Structures are given as C-alpha cells and as structure tokens.
C-alpha cells in the first residue's frame, strides 16, 4: 500500500461538472491503474497536499489525458483544494463497512444508533456511491423506519454536522411539509417575527422534488449562501435571517440524501422526519411551528395521515427537547400566484409591500403561522398572535425588517424576469373545480424551475372561479424555448391540470 | 423540439470507459446546453445517423472539448456507431414513465405483467440510471416479490430479449445457486452429457457477487462471447457448448440488473428466481437440474430455506412448462482447490484429464449432476446416471468432447498464470473445523478476481484435516502487488477465514 504513494500522478483540472460526486479520470495504462489493478467505476481514495477524497474512477484510452495525469472533476478538484500539476496519490479505499448495516436493513433488521452513526458519517463524507445512497433511501422507504429508528437516524444526522447555540430563548422556527406549490410564507414570517425581536435564525433547503425551495426563492432577493459566522452576525443584528442550510453545514448528510431522493422522487416519512428535525435541532431551535397542508394532491392527502405525521414529528422532536405546534392548513390548491423561485419571490414582495393585487391566501397563511410563533415567543397572548402579525405587515414594520435582513445578508436584489412565456388557455367555459398540485409542480419543473430561477408557472385562476373559453388559466415562464416547448408538450399530453366543470 | 435538430454538435470519441452507462460531455456554453436548459447529470437522448441512445450529460467548462463538440464515452460511441466529426443531435428524453410503477412498488403496491413489461423494456434499453436500478433492486428485496410477481417478472425478462428454439427434445440445462466458491462443475457436466448426444446449449453468466462465474472460468479455456448463430453451429456439431449469455442476448435486462446487484452485493430470492429461469426459458430449455448447496456460509444456509427456494423455482418454472429437478448438496466448504477464473479452470482440466491430484469432490459433484441429466435425457435409467457419468470421464470421452467443444467455440487455450502469489500460513496446530465461504470469496475478489483472470485463492486444506503450525492453508494469487497486499491486509484484519481447533 505504501509503494505507489512514491509515484504520484499530476493533478489536472478538467472542468467537468458532476454535482456532488468526485470523479477522477486516469489513463488505463497509467502506472496507478496497472499496479492497483483498477477498472472503470472503481472507487478510489485520492490525496493531495494533506487532503483526501473518495472518487469514482473513469478510465481513459485516448490522449485527452497524459499518462501521468489525474484528471479531476470540479468536485474532486474542490475537495482536494490542489493546484495544476501538483502530485496526486491514489489508493484502494478501505471497504465501506457501514454499508453492511444498510444491507442488513434491506433484509429487515432494524437499526440503532450504533448502525446509523457510521452510516451517516460515511454518507456525509461522500463515501457512498449513488447506487448505495439509492439503496439506503429505498430500503428505509419500503420497510418504513419506526420511531426509535427515526430518533436514532435524526441523532446521527445532527452529529455529523455543525450545531448552533444561541444565547436567547426561545429560538423559534417554522417548517412546512411540502407538496403545496407556491407556499412561500417563510420570508414573510421571518420578517414579522424578527420585527418583534424574537430570534428566528432560519436555515432553508433548496427544492427536493418541488419547483422551488425557500432557499431558491430567497436567493432571488438576497444572497443565501452565508457561513455560520455571517449568519450569526445577521441574526444578532436583525433577530432573523433566511439562509441556505447547505452552506451552514447543518445536517450535511441530509443534503447528500436529498440529491438522490430528488432523482427518485421519493420522500418517505422516516427520512422526512429526520430531515426536518435534524436541521432544526442542529440550528439550535427550541420551538417549532409546523404547517401541514392537507389535500387530495398535496404531499399529505388526508387528515388521518396528517395527524399521524404530526404525532411522529412531535414524538421524535420531544426526544430532543424540541417543542412542536402543528397547524393543519388547506392543501387543495397552490398558494399565491407564482410557482418557481422568482415568481414566488414576487408574491412575497407584493404581500410585504401591500400591493393592491397581493395574494390574500399567502398573506393569511403567513399571518397564521407568524401569529403562532409570536404567541410561543411571548409577544402575544394565545389567540391574539394572528392579529398582531397582520398589523405588523399593515404598519410597514415587516417590510422594513425584511429589507434590513436582505441588506444584512449581503444586499437586496430584484428577482430575474423570464425570457420566454406562453399562456395556457381554457378549452371551454365552466367552473374551476380542481387544480392538480403535482402536475402543475411538474409543469413548472419542466419549464426549468428551480435551476432556472425565472422559470415556472404564474396562475391566473383560483378554485371556484367561473371560466370563459379562451381565458388564460396560467402562463408558463421559461428561460429557453426548448424548455418552454417541453413544458407545453407535457401540459397537452397529460391528464388535465385544471378540471373545469361545464355549467 | 425541432429547432435544435438543425444545429448538431460534432461527435468526438473521448475513449472514456463507463461500463454500460452512456455518457456525453458537452460544453456548458454550447448552443444545445443553452437552448435546452440542460445541467450536469441531465439524461438526454443523442441521435446520430439513425441510431439513438439515452445518455447522462456531464457539462464541461474547460477547453478539453470544443464548443461544438459532443464528447462520447465508449458506450455512447458504440451505441451510436458513429464516426469522428459526424453530426450528433441532442434532445430532452421523454420521461421514463415506467419508473412510476417502481415508485408504487416501493410504497407496497404489487406489480403485474402490465407493470413489469414496460419496466424491463426500459431497463433493457438502458433508460434507467444507476440510481433507479438500485431503487428497483432494493425495492423488490425489502418487500419481497410474491410468486405471481416472480412469474410476471420472469415473463417480462424473457420478452425483452432473444429466444432460442431447438429441434431436439429434451433440451437440458443445469444451474447452481451460487455461494460456494470453486464449484465449477458446468464445463465437466456439459462435456459428459454432450458426449452422449443430449442437447445442452449452455449459456453461463459472469460473476454477480462471486470471484468467478462459469463464463469467466470458461473464458480462460476458450472464447465464450459467441453470438446466436455461432452458438447454434457449435451445438449442432457437438450437442453442447458453454458460452456467455450476455452476447447471445438472452434476458438482457438481467445483465443490466446484475451489474448493480454486484455493487450492492444483494441477490434477493425474487430477482434470483427470475434471473435463473428467464435465462433458461429464453435458451429454450425443457428440463433443468438445479444444484442447491446448503451450508452455514453458503448462499442458502438451511435445509428449510433450500426447500422453500426449490419450491419457488419449480412453481415459477412450471408456469413456463419447464421441468425442474433439484439436488441439495453439501455447502460447508469450497469445492475443488481453485477460487478465481483460471484457478478453477485448472481444477476442471485436472478432473477431465484424470490427473492424479484431481479434486475428488469436484468430480463427484459433476458426476451426480451429469447423472441426473443423463437420466432426464433418456440415456440412463433412474439411479444409474451417476455411474454412467463417471465412466464417461474414466474412458476419456468427456475430455475428448470438451476439447472438441472448445475448438468449435473458437480454439482451446491455456489459463493464464498469476504474476504474484503469497501463502497464508497456519498460526498454530490443530484440526480444521470450518472455512468461511463468504470471506474466502471476498479474499479472492480483493486479490482481483474475476477481473484479473489469474487472480484468486488456491486452497491447500479440507475440513477435518490436521493442521501443523506454519503450514500453508492457501495461496493468494494476484496480477499486481497492490491487489496482493490489499487481499492480505483483509485476511489479517478480519475474523479468521479458517477456524482451526487446538487439539
């Protein structure tokens, strides 16, 4: 194992983008591949200048690479932090022993702390391949995690990342269990709550399977990739912030898992509970208000399922001293008008700025949740929080606070505007009876959201509206004509997104 | 969707090896990525000169690639069958609709023919990513397939590939349910059975999770990558053959799944049954003899499990008119001396050539199974097949037939010899009580088998042998010092492979 360390390869940055997977390209006939007996898709350890990463090997039999070069993907390049031509050493990795525990789980053995700890540690440090991550996610979805497993998984997810501690109490947070397009209450809530001096150091995620996560939306208004020090400075100054959890390093294994969950479009209860709570616990929260939208095409489809999930979240949260209040809300249609990062940001701005056409449903939801947080935070008596929240928007304090938070995060900016758009027209007249949340979310994703910030869907109608033939139901926004066409093809080729009853 | 077809990229062969996954590299700033709004790891359809393939996109921000070039991995290059500089068109793929059925299965909905057919068709045509394949394998392992599902899966696996039809009846086959290192009876059995004119058109697999599959071993003695026409010619001439099933194109989805199963080291009952039977049905077999080794560290660990698996295989086989006879055998220790392609081939040769040191256990097992096939094939009365098989070795007919088969397959050759080897010595004296099949298989794999044909483990002891301290228990063979060292490190770092009882 020592010998080949004496003869390194030379680092070469290939500028190849592979998301989070480190990839290294080597000539099949290089001395490392020959002496180590490596083949393509081998997993190998690279080290350079004191830093190490596990990487997937692709072998090369052409001259795009020199025989003494290790071609690095961007992720490998960043993890090694090396320079062009610097020596790179390669060796067989130790076997990823913890995957044996995943394999046991697949064959129906329940896992405990002693199992999840090494699994999550290996996941967080990038030692699991995509195939192994997919097996972990699928395995814990088919044979669902029970409560002790959820506690153990949550604990392990917290343990492998950073953990914040705040001087004030309470430290409040809110979370919406997804599935409802456009439900972008967070920036409004943080502004209201922080305006009253309640600590709300909010870390948000990017989209898992939706067209936009709060971090994606907030990013169109201000920088969100703050590190812990910068985040702390913002919160100390303004009482609140809305930053991306990924940079802060809370529950980093969760981010690795989310990437594969997104590909699979799987988001099971156990992983959801651990994902939500590990972030809150790591963020140092003491109180959490949960928004659970319930509706036939929302993530949670029935009252029973909502109550079950709420119980599970509360039970697991309690194991970590986290107090949780759940609010069930209407999940029958999208919230606001915009679906997609920039379009949702425009809704947020119009509520805070009290524009004439501000979406009332978004304002109402934000006030309900912010009200609960103001009550928990001791700023309003039980039952009076909602009114106080509404007043905080009405008197402009929320808008002022939001601008201050954006400035503190690095400077407020305007959401981008889409380059291409096309309306979808009503095929006949009638009454709008339902909107399929899942299909409209997919439409927004096909149009390019959340990768293209300006892309998405702008809704022009609400449930119960009378519809005229030829009236625009929504407008699809895209950055490229290819994506616009792709989204429109989907809309015409699938079951209807809007169900109009002929009257 | 039409527009970008007018402006192709130019094909460039990058010589990058990625196993079965087609990968295309494009500049982030090329017109296709911009107009289609593509990002790294997007799945896209490439077409060139009338041929199409689905590929994974890696974006490039360096000048290893021209802005108008589509850099193709070897798999992509082969699937498109294009030439340097030829126009390559790219577009968004249609969504892989069939994965929705896999997702339903993950949430515990059973599947039928109408589900497996599109899933297997998409898998066989390379439309599933590794993440999706892993989810399919894991999902059907955690919540196991029931019998109707196994039948449906088997039918779909047969349907997506080639299917052979033979004029003679019966067409016999044998299969050993893995887990027993070195159990390389097939080449011997085919030689015996074919010597009596019974049709045995054997297609074999490469290793799934073992150090050698029959195809890996046979390849060290003769070419095994014959197409259907070549295979048919060999069988018409010699009554039998031993070829690799992958080239013949029987049950091609199975080969795609096997690659990911190998990575996961998962081989569940449902997938095993469908894998085994789909190959036999597609090969046109009418009768099958199954070898089920049972032992504490074999794949099948108890008599109960063996009986259950045998029933399942028979039940599913019957649905396709396949008659199955199961033989339970001793699975307590490896068979023969060699573990690894070339080392096992040497055992096969020594049995057929009746060498003085030929491993008796391998000869016995081959005769038992060949005997059952001779009885099924009408060449021996019930209970007399085994003796006839033994005589066929003794009078040299089996060896003659084997050489003729090898010649017909393209020419007999000698197995390669390893470059590096190191013995493992007994730490103290005693009696050899057990050998861990799984650990010794892993040792052989770490030494490089099956990729390095000459690599593996050569056993020098059998259960019950008296052992002297310092006596070699086995010899590890490897092609490179790196692999030799890696295997030896494993052997010293793990629980003992050989259990010696002090006496």
Image (cartoon, coloured by chain):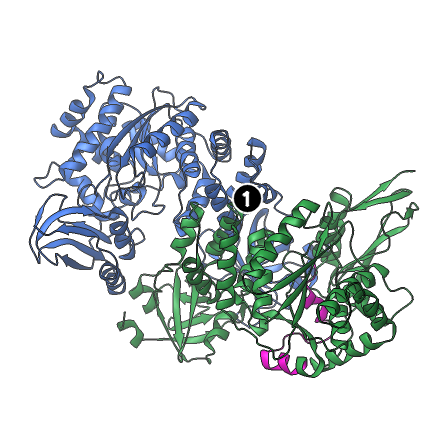
Chain colours: A green, B blue
Whether the magenta-drawn stretch holds residue B196 is answered as no
Q: Is residue A126 left or right of residue A312?
A: left
Would residue A31 be seen by someone viewing this image from the given angle? yes
- Chain assignment, label 1: B
- The image quarter containing residue B274 is top left
Q: Can you say whether A238 is above or below A440 in the image?
A: below
Residue located 91% across and 46% down the image: A467
For the magenta stretch, what is the residue range? A211-234
Residue located 21% across and 32% down the image: B366
Q: Can you say whether B155 is above or below A263 in the image?
A: above
- In percent of width and height, residue B61 lies at 58, 71
Q: On the rendered image, what quadrant is the C terminus of chain A found in?
A: top right
- The image quarter containing residue B244 is top left
Q: Secondary structure at mark 1?
A: helix
- Between B413 and A303, the residue placed more toward the observer is A303
Q: Which residue is mark 1?
A: B106
- Between B18 and B305, the residue placed more toward the observer is B305
Q: How would you rate the neighbour count of disc 1 (Cα within 10 Å): few for under 14, some for 14-19, many for 20 or more? A: many
- In percent of width and height, residue A284 lies at 59, 72
Would residue B87 be seen by someone viewing this image from the given angle? no
Whether the magenta-drawn stretch holds residue A229 is answered as yes
Q: How many marks?
A: 1
């Amino acid at each position: 194992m020592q010998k080949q360390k004496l003869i390194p390869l030379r680092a070469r940055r290939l500028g190849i983008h592979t998301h989070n997977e480190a990839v290294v390209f080597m000539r099949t006939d290089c001395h490392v591949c020959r002496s180590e007996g490596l083949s393509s898709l081998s997993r190998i350890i690279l080290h350079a200048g004191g830093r190490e990463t596990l990487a997937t090997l692709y072998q090369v039999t052409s001259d795009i690479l020199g025989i003494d070069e290790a071609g690095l993907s961007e992720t490998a390049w960043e993890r090694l932090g090396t320079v062009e031509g610097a020596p790179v050493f390669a060796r067989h990795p130790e076997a990823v022993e913890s995957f044996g525990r995943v394999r046991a789980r697949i064959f129906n053995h329940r896992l405990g702390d002693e199992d999840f700890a090494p699994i999550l540690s290996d996941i967080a440090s990038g030692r699991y391949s995509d195939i192994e991550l997919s097996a972990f996610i699928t395995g814990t979805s088919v044979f669902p995690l029970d409560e002790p497993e959820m506690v153990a998984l949550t604990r392990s997810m917290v343990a492998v990342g950073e953990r914040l501690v705040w001087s004030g109490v309470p430290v409040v947070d809110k979370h919406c269990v997804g599935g409802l397009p456009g439900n972008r209450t967070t920036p409004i809530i943080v502004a209201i709550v922080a305006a009253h001096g309640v600590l709300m150091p909010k870390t948000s995620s990017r989209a898992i399977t939706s067209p936009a996560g709060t971090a994606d939306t907030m990013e169109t208004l201000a920088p969100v990739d703050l590190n812990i020090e910068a985040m702390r400075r913002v919160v100390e100054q303004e009482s609140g912030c809305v930053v991306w959890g990924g940079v802060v390093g809370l529950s980093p294994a969760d981010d690795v898992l989310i990437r594969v969950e997104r590909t699979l479009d799987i988001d099971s209860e156990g992983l959801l509970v651990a994902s939500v709570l590990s972030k809150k616990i790591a963020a140092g929260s003491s109180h959490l208000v949960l928004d659970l939208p319930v509706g036939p095409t929302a993530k949670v489809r029935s009252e029973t399922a909502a109550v079950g999930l709420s119980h599970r979240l509360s039970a697991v949260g309690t194991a970590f001293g986290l107090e949780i209040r759940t609010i069930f809300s209407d999940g029958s249609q999208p919230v606001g008008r915009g679906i997609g990062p920039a379009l949702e940001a425009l809704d947020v701005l119009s509520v805070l700025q009290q524009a004439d056409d501000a979406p009332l449903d978004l304002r109402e939801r934000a006030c309900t949740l912010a009200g609960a947080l103001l009550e928990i935070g001791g700023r309003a008596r039980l039952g009076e929080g909602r009114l106080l929240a509404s007043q905080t928007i009405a008197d402009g304090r929320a808008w002022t606070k939001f601008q201050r938070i954006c400035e503190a995060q690095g400077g407020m900016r305007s959401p981008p505007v889409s380059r291409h758009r096309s309306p979808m027209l009503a095929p006949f007249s009638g009454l709008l009876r339902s909107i399929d949340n899942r299909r409209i979310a997919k439409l927004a994703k096909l149009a390019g959201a959340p990768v293209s910030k300006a892309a998405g869907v702008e809704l022009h109608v609400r449930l119960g509206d009378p519809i005229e033939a030829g009236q625009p139901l929504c407008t699809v926004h895209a950055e490229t004509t290819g994506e616009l066409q792709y989204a429109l093809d989907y809309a015409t080729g699938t079951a209807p997104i809007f169900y109009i009853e002929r009257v």
